[in-house]
Every structure is written in structure tokens, then in C-alpha cells.
Amino acid sequence: NFGSALFLLDRYSEAIEHYKKGLVLTEKVGDISLTILLHNFISECYLEMGMYPEAYREALISDSLSAEISKSFTRSKALLALAESAYKVGEHGKMYSAFKEYIVLTDSLFGDEKQKEIAALEQVYQFEKNQKEIAFRKQENELLSQANTASANRNYALLAALLLFVGLSYTLFRKQRYKIQSQQAAIRISQLEKEKLNQDIDHKARELTSKALHIAQKNEMIESLREQLTALSKNPNEKEVKNMVNQLKLNEQQEGIWTSFTEQFTSLNPKFHREFTHNFPDLSKGEFRLAALLRMGMGSKDIASLLNISETGLKKSRYRLRKKMELQTEESLEVEIMKY
């Protein structure tokens, strides 16, 4: 009955679903007449939907089943449905034979058979009524089941939300902890790098001081040798000794040591070397060495010894350096150098 109502509302797909549910039930009760009628109804739905091969298929099933109960109103309905669907699929021979048999059978069943069919329809109505009651009870049980399921799902959702919150909290805690540990590790690495840098600077400073002392010791030794050889050169017969004195005065052998000293000083004081040489590009090697030794905070006596010059010579060197730096009389050479 639901299927027929939906058919009248032109809701054919839904009508077919209800008719097919009816087929499942009729197979259980074994009512062949009702089974045939349901196939006819499904065929009519397919015809209205324009699905002619499907309509013809259902009509063939109905015709096949109704052949077992010939001379019945159900058979005539099956033949009519077969004729209509056969016409739509172009099976005109099948259509002709079905219509012809339908006309003959309808004429013969117009009386008593009509009453039997009415009784069968009443039986169908009663059966549908019983099924409707069963379906109502089933629907009621399903609603109760859905309510219980919804309640359980709500509890599951709350539990899932709680677990998600705990998981997120733990993840954030781990992330924050990892961030703190990373920052602590970065600080420790930075401290170690600073310590290593300071150690390297101290080591290079000691090396630089060592080189300066080494140069001073060499200069003292050379000066001592020069004085001794000068004393010996007073003997007019000692021409070779005089040559040695002149060679010692040249002091060329120390150039390699000074080169190493300058390179190491530059690596320890890159800013000073860059800015000082940029501002005073015409400085000689000796003048830059004097500036470097003053930058190291060495006294005049030590500087004179390192440069292998007298204190008078040192004063002249300081004067030339001040002149190139364009310093006034009241300006201190050491203070100005320390600014770089």
C-alpha cells in the first residue's frame, strides 16, 4: 500500500523500494498471486520512469510466475503488463501474443474470477495492515535503539575529547620542555664557544707576546754582538770584523720574524688593523709596528729594544707617526691609538 501511494505521488523510485520489500515478505509466506502483482507494480513504475528494459524484465518474471495459475485475474494483469512493456522495447510479436491472450482471458474471467481477485486483494490489504503494525513496532524499537546509541556516542565523544585534551596537553608540555632544553643547550654551546674563543685569543696573545720577547732578545743579542765587534774593529787590521758590524746593522734576518708578528697581531686585532690602515694608508712597516706595540701597551724601553733602535731613534719614530696621524701637541699618541 505504501508503494501504491508513492506511485500515485509520482515517486516511482521510492515506490519500487516498498514493492521490493513486499516481495521479500511474500516469498516468506508463499503467496504467488501477491508476488505476481508486486512484479506488475514494479514494471509499471519502470514504465513511468522510462526504464523500459527494466520494465520488460519485471513483466517477464510476472508472466512466468502467472503461467502456473492460468485463468486468473492475476494472470490477466501479468499479460497486460507484459504487452505494455514489450511494446516499449520493440518486442511487437511478444506484445501481440500477450494482448491477444489478455483479451481472451479477461472475457472468461469477467464473473466469478473477479470476485476471487477482490478477495485476494482483501487478503493483501489485511496482510499489509498486519505488516504495518509490525513495521510500526520495529520503528519504535529502532528509535529507542538510536536514542541509546546517541547517548553512548555522546559518552564516547566526551571520552575522546578528554583523551584529546590530555594528549594535546602532554604534547604541549613535551614541546615546551624540548624548547627549554634546546635553549639551555644553545646557551651552553654559546658559553663553550665563548670560552674556546677566549682561550684562542689568550693563546694567540701569549704567542704574540712571546714573539715580541723573542724579537727583543734577538735585538739585545745583536746589539751586544755589535758593541763587541765595534770594540774589535778599532784594530785597523780587522777589516773583516768591520764588515760583520755593518752586516749586523742591516738586521735583515729579523724581517721574517716581524712578518709573523704582524700577521698574528692582525688576526687578534682585525678591527684595529682595518680602520687604522684605512685612515693612514701611507704608514711604513716600521711605523705600523710602532703603532702595534703601543696598542699592546708596551713601554718605550721595550719598544726601542724590539725595534732595535735607540731611545732617540724611538722619539723620532714617534714624531713621524704623530705627524702622519696629524695629532696636535696636546693629544696623546697612545690615547689616540687606543681609540681604534
Image (cartoon, grey):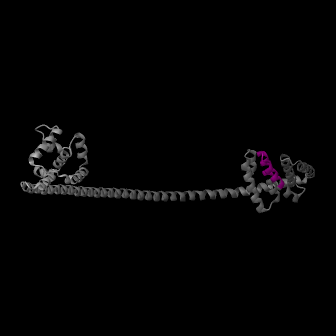
Magenta-drawn stretch contains 227: no
Please give the name of the residue rendered at 89% of the width and 54% of the height, measured from the top-left corner: 113
Residue 245 spot, x, y in % from top left = 12, 53
What residue span does the magenta drawing correspond to? Answer: 40-60
Q: Please state if 71 lies on the left or on the right of 232 as rendered.
A: right
Residue 99 spot, x, y in % from top left = 90, 49
Residue 339 spot, x, y in % from top left = 19, 43
Of residues 207 and 221, the one nearer the viewer is 221
Q: Please state if 8 lies on the left or on the right of 246 as rendered.
A: right
Q: Please state if 292 lies on the left or on the right of 127 as rendered.
A: left
Of residues 153 and 26, the one nearer the viewer is 153
Label tally: 0
Residue 269 spot, x, y in % from top left = 23, 49
Of residues 295 and 232, the one nearer the viewer is 232
Where is the C terminus found, in terms of image quarters?
top left
Please give the name of the residue rendered at 63% of the width and 59% of the height, measured from the top-left corner: 141
Q: Main secondary structure of the magenta part?
A: helix
Q: Quadrant of residue 198?
A: bottom left
Please give the name of the residue rendered at 79% of the width and 55% of the height, measured from the top-left corner: 124
Q: Quadrant of residue 279?
A: top left
Please give the name of the residue rendered at 25% of the width and 44% of the height, measured from the top-left corner: 274
